[in-house]
Image: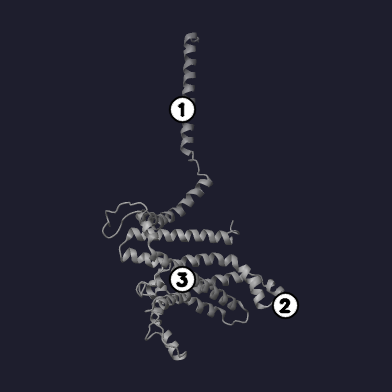
Amino acid sequence: MTEAPPEALALTQEEEARDAAIAALAASESDGARLARTAKPPRMSEEARFKWFLAFLLGPTALIVLAVVAYPFFYNVAISFSNMNIYHLRDWEFIGLGQYASVLADGRVWSILVKTTIWTFSGVFFHVALGVFLAVILHEKFIRGKSAWRILLILPWAVPQYITALTWRGMFNYEYGAINLIITKYMSLPAVEWLTSPTEAFLAVILTNVWLGFPFMMVIALGGLQSIPAALYEAADVDGASAWDKFWNITAPLLRPVMVPAITLGIVWTFNNVNVVWLVSNGGEPNDQTHILVSYVYEAAFYMYRFGWAAALSMVIFAILFTFTQVFLNRTNATESVY
């Protein structure tokens, strides 16, 4: 048997090495492709998923707030610096602070501001006084049928406001109203011109507002009374405290953190309550003597078409309420426990 020449043997070894290298390369490529196919995309972190979840929840709300609150507010700010009225409804122009100067120079605005202040603080005073009084009575153990009484007393607040306002307007009718019937028949007094005399008409809208507002304060006070420990009253009884002492030294201080925010809301709501004034007095009658600021804004905008002037007055109202709210809450430390 003849042996292969050395050149042929070297060539065969070289070919075997090349084939082995090609096989190894193919195997490595196959593993890489398989790994690429089986590799999973990187997972989103928990924090990122939480942020996307919050955006999903808050996004629609933010859009609605922008559409129904932010846009009207900034549009109102814009037209308050304009000459927009019935003659310049589409071609209005910015005129600077002219509308604000006109509002502040209008003596009628100041007289209506005084009426608005009387309307607001008298209404809120009776809301709080009646609400807290009824809540304290309902909180007593000797009261029977508390649930029924609560439902009955909440009804003035639950009934739609315009129905209550129109009902009270009918009750204040000079000839056929229930109020004058009671006054003349059971009290033997002359009938009152509730809706035709400026002072009596303003008193009529205040009475209607008191009727509408006390249930809210009563509900808030009832919730606050539930949180006062009974042991405090028992200790006061041991010390021989009177009912007034217990109310003044226990009930009133512990109700204060609950009532101050409610009073703040009540002042803002009452200041801006155009429904009662407009419906009971039939648009400020007699002779526009029962207007408050917001009803005067409504009349200026939609009866006199002074849109720019009305927008400027509404911004003045906003500034008054914003300043009052900040000062009142800071002075009373109503939000101290929140922070």
Residue 26 circle label: 1
Q: Mark 2 vs mark 1: give the one in front.
A: 2
The residue at which mark 2 appears reads as: 240
Quarter-of-image position of residue 67: bottom left
The residue at which mark 3 appears reads as: 119
Label 1 residue SS = helix
Q: Are marks 2 and 1 in contact (CB under 8 Å)?
A: no
Percent coordinates x, y for residue 149 in the rendering: 53, 80
* Type of amino acid at the residue the image marks with label 3: Trp
| Residue 334 appears in the figure | no
Q: Residue at x 50, y 46 (%)?
A: 48
Q: Is residue 318 above or below residue 237?
A: above
Looking at the picture, tell me which residue is in the foreground, 188 or 101. 101
Q: Mark 3 vs mark 1: give the one in front.
A: 3
Looking at the picture, tell me which residue is in the foreground, 39 or 284. 284
Percent coordinates x, y for residue 254 in the rendering: 63, 68
Looking at the picture, tell me which residue is in the foreground, 231 or 284. 284
Q: Is residue 32 above or below residue 163?
A: above
Q: Is residue 153 above or below residue 228?
A: below
